[in-house]
């Protein structure tokens, strides 16, 4: 599917518009499966929680895949900075990962090593750039993205049903079940379609 692999071209403009949801996709460095273990997924959940506490943003849907992440968020004030939200979240994960790897698995650092064209060297958990970012304001498109997010593990063959994948918000949409992150759906528009949400 196109959203899993796209990155934002340099000319694409992102708008922090109140009243518009944002569909965000970002990948691990060189699309390596850094999120294939429960440990790193837990770091990401904690990072998202930290970012939600610092930024006035509602989380509507998410999925953690082995090498990329999809989030559907809703900025609930006019001065929200999505780039700042992403920085808070990604920085938290990178710090946790590097602390763990330097202590327990230093050979893994080579997989995170990034030598940039300007000669600068660093270690990355996340791919350079902002990833894919799309403004959404039509209820039908918002619900299509929620379905897309929840179906991602099924399309990849990681599970048979969205509810089988622990690392997504699918449970929250199925009989108000538990999800690994708290969603805030008070501003989520009603699904205008005539079929089941998932």
Image: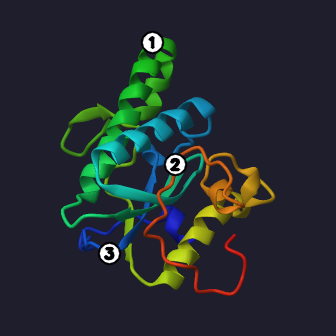
Q: Residues within 10 Å of mark 1 (few under 14, many from 20)?
A: few
Q: Residues within 10 Å of mark 3 (few under 14, many from 20)?
A: some
Where residue 19 is drawn, which disc sits there? 3
Numbered-mark total: 3
User: Does dot 3 land on a helix, a strand or a loop?
Assistant: loop
Specify which label sits upstream in the sequence, 3 or 2.
3
Measured as percent of width and height from the top left, residue 7 is found at: 39, 63
Q: Is residue 95 above or below residue 190?
A: above
Q: Is residue 74 above or below residue 105?
A: below
Q: Nearer the viewer, residue 76 or 145?
A: 76
Q: Nearer the viewer, residue 145 or 12?
A: 145
The quadrant where residue 162 appears: bottom right
The residue positioned 48% from the left and 33% from the top of the image is 43
Residue 1 visible in the current orientation:
yes
User: Does dot 2 land on a helix, a strand or a loop?
Assistant: loop
Q: Nearer the viewer, residue 111 or 19?
A: 19
Where residue 121 is drawn, which disc sits there? none
Measured as percent of width and height from the top left, residue 57 is found at: 34, 57
Is the C terminus in the top left, top right, bottom left or bottom right quadrant? bottom right
Disc 2: which residue: 182
Q: Residues within 10 Å of mark 2 (few under 14, many from 20)?
A: some
Residue 113 visible in the current orientation:
no
Disc 1: which residue: 103
Of circles 1 and 3, the one toward us is: 3
Q: CA distance from mark 3 to mark 2?
A: 20 Å
């Amino acid at each position: 599917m196109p959203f899993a692999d796209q990155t934002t071209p340099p000319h694409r403009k992102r708008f922090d518009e109140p009243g518009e949801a944002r569909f965000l996709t970002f990948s691990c460095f060189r699309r390596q499966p850094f999120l294939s273990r429960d440990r790193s997924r837990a770091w990401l959940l904690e990072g998202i929680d930290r970012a939600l506490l610092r930024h006035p943003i509602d989380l509507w849907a998410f999925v953690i895949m082995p090498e990329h992440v999809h989030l559907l968020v809703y900025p609930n004030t006019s001065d929200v900075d999505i780039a700042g939200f992403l920085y808070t979240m990604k920085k938290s994960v990178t710090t946790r990962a590097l602390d763990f790897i330097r202590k327990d698995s230093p050979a893994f650092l080579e997989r995170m090593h990034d030598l940039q064209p300007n000669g600068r060297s660093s270690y990355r958990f996340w791919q350079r750039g902002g990833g894919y970012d799309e403004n959404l304001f039509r209820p039908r498109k918002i619900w299509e993205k929620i379905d897309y997010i929840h179906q991602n593990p099924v399309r990849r063959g990681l599970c048979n049903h969205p509810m089988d994948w622990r690392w997504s918000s699918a449970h929250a949409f199925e009989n108000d079940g538990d999800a690994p992150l708290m969603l805030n759906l008070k501003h989520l528009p009603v699904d205008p379609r005539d079929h089941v949400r998932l």
